[in-house]
């Protein structure tokens, strides 16, 4: 992503005229393209920001950003729905969802043992 593209995505995130889902989609695009905090800071005119700061990965309290369960805590999204998403890999719309599923695969398999998790 170019600095101009990064700036555009950041402005989408802080623009109060868009929905939270649209703002989250912008965050996901930055994550998908592996844009670092340092790149964001430089694009916004702060090249001295620390390069090692990354946005936090999803945990169980993170909200599902899209789909049928948008706005639901990840721990409360049904395992069968996450199984279906897992079968759609890569989940390019939001890599944090795919990472969450991968990190919780064993527990999800117990909750939905009939699912195809390969």
Image (cartoon, helix red, strand yellow):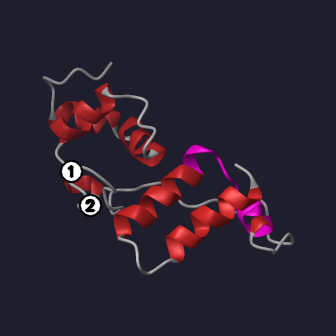
- The answer to whether the residues at label 1 and label 2 have Cβ atoms under 8 Å apart is yes
First to last magenta residue range:
31-42
Residue at figure coordinates x 26%, y 60% from the top left? 73
Q: Which quadrant of the structure image shows residue 9?
A: bottom right
Q: How many marks?
A: 2
- Secondary structure of the residue carrying tag 1 is loop
Q: Which residue is nearer to you in this view: 92 or 100?
A: 92
Image height check: is 19 above or below 83? below
Horizontal side of 71 relative to 7 (left or right) equals left
Q: Position of residue 97 (x, y in %)?
A: 39, 45
List the residue tagged with mark 2: 73
Residue 52 visible here: no
Residue at figure coordinates x 25%, y 54% from the top left? 75
Q: Which quadrant of the structure image shows residue 51?
A: bottom right
- Secondary structure of the residue carrying tag 2 is loop
Badge 2: residue crowd in 10 Å (few <14, some 14–19, many ≥20): some
Horizontal side of 13 relative to 65 (left or right) equals right
List the residue tagged with mark 1: 77
Residue 79 forms part of the magenta stretch: no
Q: Residue furthest bottom?
A: 16
Residue at figure coordinates x 29%, y 35% from the top left? 85
Q: Position of residue 115 (x, y in %)?
A: 18, 24
Q: Position of residue 3 (x, y in %)?
A: 75, 59
Q: Position of residue 42 (x, y in %)?
A: 80, 66
Secondary structure character of the magenta stretch overall: helix
Horizontal side of 26 relative to 67 (left or right) equals right
Residue 85 visible here: yes
Kindly report the distance in space between the C-alpha atoms of the residues bearing marks 1 and 2: 7 Å
Horizontal side of 57 relative to 50 (left or right) equals left
Q: Which residue is nearer to you in this view: 64 or 13?
A: 13
């Amino acid at each position: 992503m170019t600095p101009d593209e990064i700036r555009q995505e950041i402005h989408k995130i802080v623009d109060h005229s868009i929905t939270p889902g649209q703002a989250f989609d912008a965050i996901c695009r930055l994550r998908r393209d592996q844009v670092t905090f340092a790149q964001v800071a430089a694009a916004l005119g702060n090249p001295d920001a620390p390069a090692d700061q990354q946005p936090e990965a999803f945990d169980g309290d993170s909200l599902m950003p899209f789909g049928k369960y948008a706005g639901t805590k990840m721990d409360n999204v049904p395992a069968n729905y996450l199984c279906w998403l897992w079968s759609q890999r890569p989940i390019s719309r939001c890599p944090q969802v795919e990472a969450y599923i991968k990190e919780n695969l064993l527990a999800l398999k117990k909750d939905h043992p009939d699912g195809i998790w390969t």
